[in-house]
Image (cartoon, coloured by chain):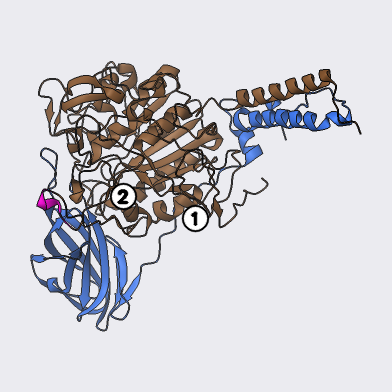
C-alpha cells in the first residue's frame, strides 16, 4: 500500500485539519479564555449561561461539612448533587471586606474589615497599585471602582441581586436605591444596621451599597431587589422577585446574587425574626436556619428552565469562624506575638486562613483583623463551598485551594469579560493577580453536561496540584450513573 | 424525537478518499464531528427552550429536603450528641421526656459600631416535656465548655430547679459568658451524661 500522499492532497488535508481545529475553537463557548499567566493553560470552562451565587455567613469548613451542626441538607444532601470545594477560603474578617473582595477584587480596609461602623464614603479614594484603592477611612467606594455588576452591564449580560427582607422596614434601608442605609456623604450613617424581628436584612451582607458605581445608577439599583420582589412606588416600577424571574429563561438573569437575611445566612445563632421553620416560636439560627432557607430555594432554582439548560448554583460563605480543626495544624499555639493577648490557644496558622498568595493590600496589614487570635496574616479561613450544575459530576470533591479573588476571576472569565479591568483582560483588582487560578477542570468536571444521578460525596476526588498546568488524575471511588435513558 | 436543526451532524469532506489518506481525513472528520457535537451540547437549544438539552443530556435531578430524622433517644447508658436546638427523647429510670436546649440568646447583641466584642453573656433555655413519670431538672445538671476545653460557668436564671410530671412542660434557663467560637452544653442526670449539644457563638 502506498502511504505517500501527493503534495496537493496533503495540502488539502492539512487545510481540512486546520479548518476543523479552528472551528472547534470557534464553536466553543466564549468563556474562560485564560491568559496573563493565570489560567489552566488552554482550559475553557463549559458554557454556563446562568449562575446563582448564594452567600452564607461565618462558618468554617469543619462547622459546616463535618457534622458538627444541624445542617444535613448543606452538609450531606447538596454535595451529593454537585461538588464540595474543601479548600475554599475567605479573604478577611469580618463580613463586609469579603463581599467587597468578591465583587470588586478590593482588599480589606480598616473600616470594611470592621463591618463599616459608619456608612460613609471612602477617603481618600485614590487609585493604588494592582487596581486597589487607598481607603484609610470609610467604606463606600468612588464611582471609579467597578464591580462584576458593572462589567456585566458593559457586555450586556443581565444580573440581579436578591436580598431577603430588604425594604421590610423602609425607614431602615432604601430598597429603591440598592438597599443603602442612608446617604454616605459627610458623616454618613452611624451603625448601618443589624437585624430586627420584622427586617433581618443587613447592608453589610449586600454587595451593592458599598459602590458609587452602583448606588448612583438608578438602572443598576433597579436590579437590586428584595428576594420576593418590590412593589411599585412613585418613580419606581414594580420589580419581580426570584420566584417570578425563574419562570422562564428570558426572565432569568444571567447572574443572580442571593443574600439571605441575617437568619437564613446562618449568621445569627438565635434569629431576631422568622427562621422559615414554620414555627413562630422557633428562632434557632446558625446552619439550622440556613438549611431551612436552602431547602426552599435550591429546589426552586434547580426546577427552573434556566438552571436545567445551563445553570450553576454556588453556595459560598464569606469567612470562617472557629472551630478550625480540620487540618490538625489549625490551632497553631503560636506564641510569638508581640501582643501577648494574641498568644491564645485559638491562634490560627496562615495555612488555614489564607490561600492563593493572597496579598494584604495597601490599606491594612492585617486583613484577618486578628480575629480569634489570628496572627498578622491575611485571610478569612477555610469555609468550603458547594457548586451544583449539569457541568459538575455529583458527589465530586476538589481539594484545590480557591478564594474570593479566584471566584471573581472565574466569573469574569465565565461571562467572557476579556477587556478592561486591572490587567486589561477583564479582571478587577486582585482578581487580576498574576498566577491566580480560576475554577478549572477539577470543578467543571463534566463538560459534556450529561445529567447524572446523585452520588455520595467523595465519589470522585480531585487532589490539589501545585502548578496550574499540572495534570490531575482524579480518584474515582464510585462511578457516576447517568439519569435514566441517558 | 425532534432533532434540533443545529444538532444535525454533517460529514464535511470529499466523501471519497484513497486509503492512504484515511488517517488524516479521519482526524479532520473527528474534529469536525466534535465541532458539531460541541455546538449541539452547548448551544443547540433556542434561547428560551431547555427541552433539547433535557432530551439529549437528561434532566438534572433535584434534591428534595431529607425527611425529618427520628428524634434521637438517649439514656444514662447511651448519651446523645446533638446540635443546639435539636430535641432528644430521654429515657431515664424515673421518667421519659422530650428535652431540648436552645440558644445561647445574647442579652446584648452587637449591632455595629466599635469592634465586635470577644465575648457576650448569653442564655441557654432547656425545655422539658415528660411523657412518663416525674422529672426533676436542676441548673447544676448542666455544664458548658468551649472549644479549648475551658469551663464556662453557668448561673441559673430564675428557679434553679424544676420538677415536672407527664403531660405538662417546663423550662429552665442558665446564663454564661461565651466567647466567639464553638462550645457545648452537657446535661447530666443522676451524675451521668445524657446529652451534649454543641453550638457556635457569633459576635460580629
Residue A376, image x and y in percent? 20, 44
Check if residue A189 falls in the magenta segment: no
Which residue is more in the foreground, A21 or A162? A21
What residue is shown at x 29% (from left), y 27% (from top)?
Answer: A208
Q: Which of marks 2 and 1 is in front?
A: 2
- Say whether mark 1 and mark 2 are on the same chain: yes
What residue is shown at x 40% (from left), y 54% (from top)?
Answer: A75
What residue sits right under mark 2 in the picture? A352
The magenta-colored residue range is: A338-344
Q: How far apart are marks 2 and 1 (CA)?
A: 21 Å
A105 relative position to B162: left or right? right
Q: Quadrant of the C terminus of chain B?
A: top left
The secondary element bearing badge 2 is classed as helix
Residue A226, image x and y in percent? 32, 32
What residue sits right under mark 1 in the picture? A458
The secondary element bearing badge 1 is classed as loop
| Residue A289 appears in the figure | yes
Residue A410, image x and y in percent? 43, 33
Check if residue A339 falls in the magenta segment: yes
A144 relative position to A154: left or right? left
Pinpoint the chain carrying mark 2: A
Asked if marks 2 and 1 touch (Cβ < 8 Å), the reply is no
Q: Is residue A372 above or below residue B135?
A: above
Amino acid at each position: 500500500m502506498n502511504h505517500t500522499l501527493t503534495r496537493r492532497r496533503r495540502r488539502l488535508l492539512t487545510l481540512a485539519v486546520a479548518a476543523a481545529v479552528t472551528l472547534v475553537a470557534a464553536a466553543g463557548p466564549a468563556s474562560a479564555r485564560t491568559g496573563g499567566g493565570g489560567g489552566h493553560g488552554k482550559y475553557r470552562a463549559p458554557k454556563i449561561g446562568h449562575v446563582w451565587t448564594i452567600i452564607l455567613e461565618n462558618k468554617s469548613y469543619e462547622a459546616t461539612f463535618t457534622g458538627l451542626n444541624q445542617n444535613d441538607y448543606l452538609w450531606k444532601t447538596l454535595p451529593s448533587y454537585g461538588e464540595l470545594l474543601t479548600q475554599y477560603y475567605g479573604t478577611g474578617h469580618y463580613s463586609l471586606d469579603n463581599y467587597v473582595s468578591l465583587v470588586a477584587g478590593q482588599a480589606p480596609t480598616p473600616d470594611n474589615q470592621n463591618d463599616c461602623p459608619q456608612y460613609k464614603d471612602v477617603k481618600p479614594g485614590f487609585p493604588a497599585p494592582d487596581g486597589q484603592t487607598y481607603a484609610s477611612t470609610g467604606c463606600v467606594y468612588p464611582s471609579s471602582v467597578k464591580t462584576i455588576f458593572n462589567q456585566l452591564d458593559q457586555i450586556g449580560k443581565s444580573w440581579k441581586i436578591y436580598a431577603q427582607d430588604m425594604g421590610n422596614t423602609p425607614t431602615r434601608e432604601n430598597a429603591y436605591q440598592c438597599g443603602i442605609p442612608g446617604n454616605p456623604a459627610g458623616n454618613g450613617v452611624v451603625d448601618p444596621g443589624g437585624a430586627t424581628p420584622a427586617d433581618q436584612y443587613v447592608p453589610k451582607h449586600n454587595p451593592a451599597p458599598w459602590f458609587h458605581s452602583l448606588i448612583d445608577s438608578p438602572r443598576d439599583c433597579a436590579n437590586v431587589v428584595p428576594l420576593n420582589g418590590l412593589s411599585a412606588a412613585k418613580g419606581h416600577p414594580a420589580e419581580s422577585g426570584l420566584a417570578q424571574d425563574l419562570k422562564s429563561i428570558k426572565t432569568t438573569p444571567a447572574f443572580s446574587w442571593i443574600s439571605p437575611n441575617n437568619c437564613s445566612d446562618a449568621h445569627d445563632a438565635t434569629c431576631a425574626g422568622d427562621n422559615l421553620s414554620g414555627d413562630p416560636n422557633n428562632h434557632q439560627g446558625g446552619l439550622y436556619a440556613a438549611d431551612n432557607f436552602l431547602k426552599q430555594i435550591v429546589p426552586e432554582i434547580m426546577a427552573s428552565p434556566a438552571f436545567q439548560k445551563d445553570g450553576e448554583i454556588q453556595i459560598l460563605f464569606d469567612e470562617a469562624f472557629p472551630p478550625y480543626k480540620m487540618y490538625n495544624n489549625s490551632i497553631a499555639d503560636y506564641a510569638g506575638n508581640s501582643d501577648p493577648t494574641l498568644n491564645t490557644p485559638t491562634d490560627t496558622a496562615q495555612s488555614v486562613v489564607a490561600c492563593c498568595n493572597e496579598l494584604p493590600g495597601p490599606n491594612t496589614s492585617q486583613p484577618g483583623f486578628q480575629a480569634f487570635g489570628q496572627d498578622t496574616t491575611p485571610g478569612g479561613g477555610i469555609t468550603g463551598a458547594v457548586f451544583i450544575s449539569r457541568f459538575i459530576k455529583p458527589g465530586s470533591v476538589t481539594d484545590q485551594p480557591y478564594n474570593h479573588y479566584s471566584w471573581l476571576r472565574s466569573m469574569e472569565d465565565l461571562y467572557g469579560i476579556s477587556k478592561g479591568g486591572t490587567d486589561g483582560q477583564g479582571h478587577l483588582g486582585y482578581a487580576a493577580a498574576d498566577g491566580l487560578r480560576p475554577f478549572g477542570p477539577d470543578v467543571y468536571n463534566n463538560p459534556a453536561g450529561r445529567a447524572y444521578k446523585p452520588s455520595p460525596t467523595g465519589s470522585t476526588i480531585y487532589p490539589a496540584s501545585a502548578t496550574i498546568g499540572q495534570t490531575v488524575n482524579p480518584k474515582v471511588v464510585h462511578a457516576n450513573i447517568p439519569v435514566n435513558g441517558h | 424525537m425532534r432533532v434540533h436543526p443545529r444538532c444535525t451532524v454533517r460529514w464535511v469532506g470529499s466523501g471519497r478518499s484513497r486509503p492512504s489518506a484515511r488517517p488524516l481525513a479521519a482526524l479532520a472528520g473527528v474534529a469536525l464531528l466534535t465541532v458539531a457535537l460541541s455546538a449541539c451540547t452547548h448551544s443547540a437549544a433556542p434561547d428560551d427552550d431547555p427541552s433539547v438539552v433535557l432530551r439529549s443530556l437528561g434532566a438534572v435531578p433535584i434534591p428534595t429536603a431529607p425527611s425529618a430524622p427520628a428524634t434521637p433517644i438517649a439514656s444514662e447508658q447511651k448519651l446523645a450528641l446533638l446540635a443546639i436546638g435539636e430535641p432528644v427523647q430521654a429515657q431515664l429510670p424515673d421518667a421519659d421526656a422530650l428535652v431540648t436546649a436552645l440558644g445561647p440568646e445574647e442579652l446584648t447583641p452587637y449591632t455595629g459600631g466599635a469592634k465586635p466584642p470577644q465575648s457576650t453573656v448569653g442564655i441557654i433555655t432547656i425545655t422539658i416535656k415528660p411523657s412518663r413519670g416525674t422529672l426533676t431538672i436542676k441548673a447544676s445538671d448542666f455544664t458548658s465548655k468551649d472549644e479549648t476545653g475551658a469551663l464556662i460557668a453557668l448561673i441559673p436564671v430564675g428557679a434553679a430547679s424544676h420538677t415536672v410530671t407527664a403531660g405538662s412542660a417546663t423550662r429552665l434557663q442558665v446564663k454564661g459568658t461565651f466567647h466567639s467560637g464553638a462550645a457545648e452544653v452537657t446535661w447530666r442526670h443522676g451524675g451521668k451524661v445524657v446529652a451534649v449539644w454543641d453550638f457556635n457563638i457569633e459576635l460580629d
